[in-house]
Image: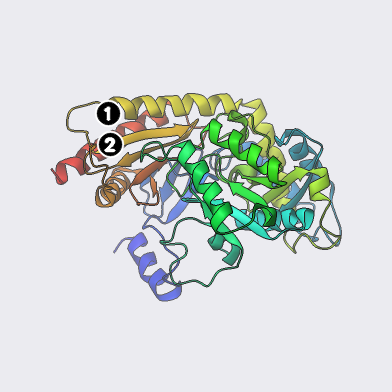
Amino acid sequence: MTIAESLQARQKAAVAPGVGTRAIFADRAENAELWDVDGKRYIDFASGIAVNNTGHRHPKVMQAVQEQALRFTHTCFHVAPYEGYVRLAERLNAIAPTGAENRTMLVSTGAEAVENAVKIARAYTKRSGIIAFSGAFHGRTMLGMALTGKVAPYKKNFGPFPAEIYHAPFPNDYLGLSVDQAIEGLERLFTSDVDPERIAAFIIEPVQGEGGFNVAPKEFLVRLREIADRHGILMIADEVQAGMARTGKMFGFEHSGVKPDLVTMAKGLAGGFPLSAVTGRAEVMSAAHAGGLGGTYGGNPLAVAAANAVLDVIEEEKLCERAAKVGARMTARLTALAERQGMERIGDVRGLGAMVAFELVEDRQSKKAAPEITSRIVAEAEQRGLILLSCGTRANVVRLLAPLTIGEDTLEEGLDILEASIEAAFSAVA
C-alpha cells in the first residue's frame, strides 16, 4: 500500500464525505510544481483554484510571513489594530477600479467578502433585493449558495435559501444566448418578479469561474451599468477568482472600462494564506454602522503580510503582462489542437489572460455536453503528472489556472501533458 492509499483510508474514516477531494496528498510544493507523499511530481495547472497566482511558496511572500510571525500572529483587528492591515487597505483603495475614493475591509474567505458586500449594498441603498446571474458562483455559505447559479454540487439538498435573491441570464455566445437576449431576460425579471426599485445590487463575475470561464462581454457590462445607474442599483464586481493579475490586468473588470461600486477579492490576494477583501466607493462603504462589519480572524496579520508581499511581487515581476503571455500560449496550443482532425470534441476555447478553458462536446453541431470525456481528461492528466480542474454548469469544461510565475519549460511540459491526455481520452472513447 502506498502512503497515499493509506491516507485515503484514514481520510475515509475521519473526514466528512461531503468534503470532495482528489487522490493527490501533497507533501511539498515550489512555484508551479507539487510533489505528493509518495514522491510523485505534478505540474500544477490549478494553483489551489486560482490562489497561488504568485506560485507555491514565493520567497518574498514566505519571508514576509516569517517576519510577521516573529512579531505576533493574532490580536483581532477590532481589539488591537496593526499597521499592515491599514497599509494593505490603502493599497487596495488605490488599485480597485471604482474610479472613486475607496475604503476597504478585510475578512478571510471569498464567501465572507461576498456576504459583506451584500450587507454594505443593502445598508447604503436601504433595499434588500440582489440580482446574480445564471452560471454564477459566489460561495458555499447560505447566502453564497443563494447567489450561485449552479445547482450541483453546490446547492443540492441544502435549501431553503435566503429570500430576495434573483437570477438573470448571463450571455453565452457559444450556446447562443446573446447580450440582447440576456438584457431582455433582465428586463423581464423587472416586470414579472421584482420591482427594480427593490434591488440593492447586481453581483457579477467578469469571468465566471465555476460557471465555465464564460467572459462577460464588454457590451453587457456597459449596459448593465447603465441599467444600474437608471434605477439606483449598485454593481458588485466579484473578482474572487478573476482578480489579482489573473486575467492580464489586476482586476477582470478593467478590461471593460466599467466602474463597479464594490469589489470583492480573495484567492490570489494573499498567495496561499486565507484573506479576502471588500473595497468600494467611500460613501458606499461608510453606510454600515461601526461594529457592523468584521470578524475575529478578519485581516489576520500573517495573511495581511503575505498580501502586501503579493502586491509587491505582482508589480516587480510584471505578472499582469506575464498572465497575458501565459494565457496566449495556452490558447494558441489549445486552438491548434482543436483544429486537428479527430479533435472535434473540443467545442470551444476561451478565456481572458491566464484564465483559460476549453469546452468538451459530443459534436460541434449539437454542442451536447460531454462530461464523461471531461472527467477522463482530468484523470488522464493526473496519471501523467498534471493537475487540472473541471468546471461549467454542464460539467464539461476544463480550466487552466497555472501560477503566473510558471517557468517557460514547465509551462511547455504541462501543455505537452495536456495534449497527450486529451489525445488519450479521445482515443479511449472513439
Rendered residue at 48%/37% (across/down): 180
> Label 2 crowding class (10 Å Cα cut-off): few <14, some 14-19, many 20+?
many
User: SS class of the residue under badge 1?
Assistant: helix
Give the left or right position of residue 309, taking residue 347 as reference: right
* Image spot of residue 423 (x, y percent): 21, 37
* Image spot of residue 87 (x, y percent): 81, 41
Rendered residue at 69%/38% (across/down): 309
Question: How far apart are labels 1 and 2 at the CA level?
Answer: 9 Å
* Image spot of residue 325 (x, y percent): 48, 24
Give the left or right position of residue 351, taking residue 366 as reference: right
Rendered residue at 30%/44% (across/down): 381
Q: Nearer the viewer, residue 41 or 50?
A: 50
Give the left or right position of residue 276, taking residue 188 as reference: right
Q: Which mark is residue 346?
A: 2
> Label 1 crowding class (10 Å Cα cut-off): few <14, some 14-19, many 20+?
some
Q: Which residue is mark 1?
A: 337
User: What amino acid is found at the position of numbered circle 1 in the picture?
Assistant: Leu
Are circles 1 and 2 on residues that touch, CB within 8 Å? yes
Rendered view: 28 above or below 259: below
Q: Earlier in the sequence, mark 1 or mark 2?
A: 1
Rendered view: 128 above or below 333: below
User: What amino acid is found at the position of numbered circle 2 in the picture?
Assistant: Ile
Q: Nearer the viewer, residue 341 or 189?
A: 189
